[in-house]
Image (cartoon, rainbow, N blue to C red):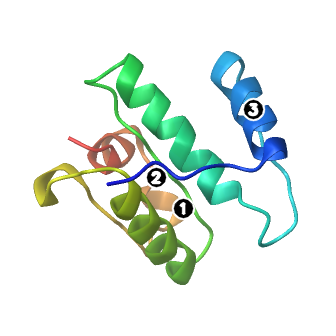
Amino acid sequence: MHTPKPRLYQENILNTCIKNNCLVVLPTGTGKTLIAVLLAIERIKKYPKSKILVLAPSRPLVAQHYTTFKNYINLEKKESVSYTHLRAHETSLHLVCRLLLE
């Protein structure tokens, strides 16, 4: 697996997100997923037992993120999960805990 090289603005956003909680709002196609992947890599380096939870509003976006993360982060099959079709009544703490990577 190779680590992608971010653009300067992505590096600046990434560095801010490493130090603080962030909500990244950028237009479509400007590299939000790459920032998320790089942040996940940093988090896993710093906290090897940590879990990464990625939320997306549609099945295609869930599949896209899942593929992107698997391309850049070396995960075994048993370490990653992808859920779709969650309903409001299913978003209990129990379900959220099941969604986290083991």
x and y percentages locating residue 75 in the rendered image = 23, 51
Numbered label attached to residue 22: 3
Residue at the disc numbered 1? 88
Q: Which part of the image, by quadrant, shows the N terminus?
A: bottom left
| Residue 9 in which image quadrant | top right
Tag 1 near tag 2, CB within 8 Å: yes
Q: Say what secondary structure mark 3 lies in.
A: loop
Q: Residues within 10 Å of mark 1 (few under 14, many from 20)?
A: few
Which mark is drawn over residue 91?
2
The Cα–Cα distance between marks 3 and 1, rounded to whole angstroms, is 24 Å
Residue beneath the point at 41% across and 40% down: 52
User: In the rendering, at what x and y percent does residue 56 appear?
Assistant: 58, 64
39 up-or-down from 18: above or below = below
Q: Residue at x 61, y 55 (%)?
A: 34
Q: Amino acid at mark 2?
A: Thr
**Residue found at x 48% / y 38%:** 40
